[in-house]
Amino acid sequence: MAIITSDPKVYTIRDYKSPVHNTWCAGCGDFGILNAIQLGLAELQLPPHQVAVFSGIGCSGKAPHYINAFGIHTLHGRVLPTATGGKLANPEMTVIAVGGDGDGYGIGAGYFVNAGRRNVDLTYLVFDNEVYGLTKGQAAPTMQKGLRAKGMPEPAIQDNINPLALAIASGYTFVARGYALQPKGLATLIAEAVSHRGTAFIDILQTCPYYNDLHTKEWYSEVFDHEPRLYQLDDTDYDGVVRDPTNLDEIVAKKVQAMTKSYEWGERIPLGVLYKVDMATYEDQLATGRPTTNGATGEPNLWNRDLSSLLNALR
Ligand code: SF4
């Protein structure tokens, strides 16, 4: 869905490229994701000055340097609270948070869960390569127990997390998986996520040719019984969209279905939207009043009062 603005200029992918020299390794999957973000912004025709890209620390943390938009390179694991503050301070801005799986699911795990509960209108893209690439390939939280990539002295001895299942359980209202080396399809998925009102999350499978010699471009491209390992949910009869957000039974059924789908990994790996629901955002609820358990609007929030009544309320 295109976002209509009053700006008559037609934006192309070039408008979102910055002149900053790129220091990612040759062949890194990050290039595909960067390309997809820029293509997605062009698809939405968003003026660069209305976009803010926040990042954490890691190879992916450099992404805002390469995008012509507002860019904020934050602290390790802290991208989501910083992006949340940015969106609440300037709700007119399109906010995109980016980071690696180590950044988001390791040090940032608490923020990851609580961002899902809030449903602020922003998009979170995780560059998931299963390793800490910037610090020479240690196992990140998505590295499967028992696997050993070439930067690891021993196989991983901890269980890996399932980011999609964690996102669904945490309350994210748009949960999807993409693949870095299919930038056109990923761009469309990113555009859909950015257009979603609420917190949209995409876990993006990303190749790291320097430190992940297990899940490589060749591995992701393998075919079994004439079926590709990576397949699009759109090509099946899978439907993860909640039609009636007031129907708790439907929400639970779609969440269970999406969680089950998120555990499909191996010879078949699904890509696309696993779960989607339209719910009131954090900003909506601040503006309209305290939500109640029965869905009715309660008293106006403190934030929604003028300054004198706010001061009176706090006396
Ligand atoms: Fe990309 Fe891996 Fe190099 Fe980092 S270390 S830039 S993730 S290839």
Image: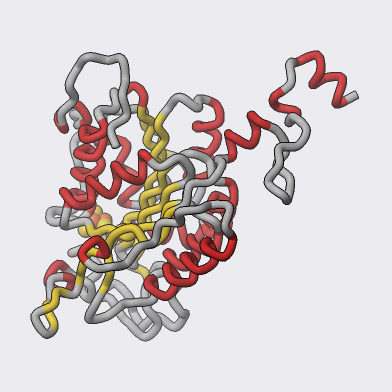
* Image x and y of residue 3, in percent: 32, 29
Q: Nearer the viewer, residue 53 or 22?
A: 53
Q: Is residue 162 visible?
A: no
Query: 55 above or below 243?
Result: above
Q: Residue at x 27, y 58 (%)?
A: 178
Q: Nearer the viewer, residue 226 or 88?
A: 226
* Image x and y of residue 238, in percent: 32, 67
Displayed quadrant of residue 155: bottom left
Q: Is 70 positioned to the left or the right of 283 in the image?
A: left
Quarter of the picture containing the C terminus is top right
* Image x and y of residue 131, in percent: 34, 66
Q: Is residue 10 visible?
A: yes
Displayed quadrant of residue 152: bottom left
Q: Residue at x 22, y 37 (%)?
A: 38
Q: How many marks?
A: 0
Tell me which image quadrant ligand 1 sits in.
Answer: bottom left
Q: Residue at x 53, y 46 (%)?
A: 279
Quarter of the picture containing the N terminus is top left
Q: Is 77 positioned to the left or the right of 223 in the image?
A: right
